[in-house]
Structure formats: C-alpha cells, structure tokens
Image: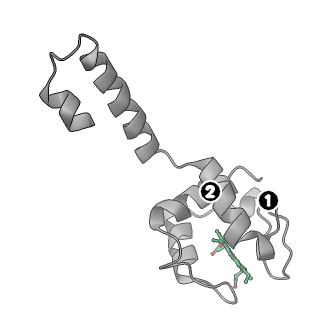
Amino acid sequence: MIPKLALRPGTFPRTGILLAAVLASCGGSALAADINKGGTLYATHCAACHGANGTPVMPGTPNFRRMESLMKPDMQLLTVIRNGKGVMPGYFGVLRDREILDVVAYLRTLS
Ligand code: HEC
C-alpha cells in the first residue's frame, strides 16, 4: 500500500499528507516499546513466577514493585531474559528481542 501511494503521488491530492501520516505512525511504533503488548506477554510467560503485578510468587524472585530490582539497563535485562538465570528459563527462541524489550518496558511500569 505504501509503495503504490509513493509511486503515484498525483493520484489524489492528499496523498503526501496521508503518506507522511502512515510513515509517522509506523516509525513511531517500530521504535518505541509497546507496554500493552509487554503486559500481555508478561501475563502469559512471566506472571506464574513473578506475580501478576510484579510481587514475587516464587521465592528468590526479584520484586519488580521495587525499582532496585530493575536497575540494570534494558540491554542487560534483555540478555538475562534471553539466556535465563538460575531457575528462570531462557526465552531465546520463545520471545523475539523486540517482545522482550516490550516486556522490560512493562516491568518498568510496575514499581
Ligand atoms: C520459572 C519461574 C520464572 C519465570 C517463568 C520467569 N522468571 Fe524471571 N526470574 C525468576 C527467578 C527465580 C529469578 C532470580 C534469578 C536469580 O537471581 O538467580 C528471576 C529473575 C528475573 C529478572 C532479574 C534478572 C537480573 O539479573 O536482575 C528479570 C528481569 C526477570 N526475571 C524477568 C522475567 C521475565 C520478563 C519473564 C517472562 C518472559 C520471566 N522473568 C519469567 C523466575 C522466573
């Protein structure tokens, strides 16, 4: 749909504006982590141990309600979640990096 519009800019007058709007909305969602999506993924994959709202269910699990549990930068958390840690399974091959970053963005809303 985008290439077609781009190839025929004269097709109708608002094409330029439309195209700009489409590109802006795509660009935005491609760059920013999606907290809602992260929340859904969290509920599916993480809540069993980490608790629905970040209060640990399983002993030894960090409390995401406390900011101190998420002091590491996103990329470091991504690596831990990808590879697993202790009893926590790794999510490489289960979640894409993008999805893990969505979950991390969600985790940061819990404290
Ligand atoms: C089987 C239970 C279990 C599941 C499922 C689980 N975790 Fe964990 N998680 C743990 C435990 C236990 C730890 C503490 C590990 C340690 O320090 O040895 C932990 C630690 C963490 C940490 C802290 C890592 C660090 O180095 O500070 C993060 C972040 C985390 N989990 C995120 C997630 C996310 C996101 C998911 C879902 C995609 C998830 N966990 C799924 C049990 C689990």
Marked residue nearer the N-terminal end (1 or 2): 2
Residue 86, quarter of the rendered image = bottom right
Viewer-nearest residue: 19 or 34: 19
Viewer-nearest residue: 46 or 84: 46
Q: Position of residue 30 (x, y in %)?
A: 41, 46
Label 1 element class? loop
Q: Position of residue 36 (x, y in %)?
A: 64, 48
Q: Is mark 1 within 8 Å of ligand 1?
A: no
Q: Point out which mark residue 66 bears.
A: 1
**Left-right relation of 39 to 95:** right
Q: Which residue is mark 2?
A: 38
| Circle 1 crowding by C-alpha within 10 Å: few under 14, some 14–19, many from 20 | some
Q: Is mark 2 within 8 Å of ligand 1?
A: no
Position of 49 relative to 5 (above/below): below
Q: Position of residue 81 (x, y in %)?
A: 57, 74
Specify whether residue 74 is in view. Answer: no
| Circle 2 crowding by C-alpha within 10 Å: few under 14, some 14–19, many from 20 | many
Q: Quadrant of ligand 1?
A: bottom right
Question: Could you tell me which residue is drawn at 80 percent across and 63 percent down?
Answer: 54
Residue 85, quarter of the rendered image = bottom right
Position of 95 relative to 68 (above/below): below
Q: Position of residue 90 (x, y in %)?
A: 57, 83
Residue type pointed to by label 2: Gly
Q: What separation in Å lies between label 1 and label 2 (alpha carbons)?
A: 18 Å
**Left-right relation of 46 to 97:** right
Residue type pointed to by label 1: Arg
Q: Point out which mark residue 95 bears.
A: none
Position of 71 relative to 50 (above/below): above
Specify whether residue 26 is in view. Answer: yes
Question: Could you tell me which residue is drawn at 81 percent across and 82 percent down?
Answer: 60
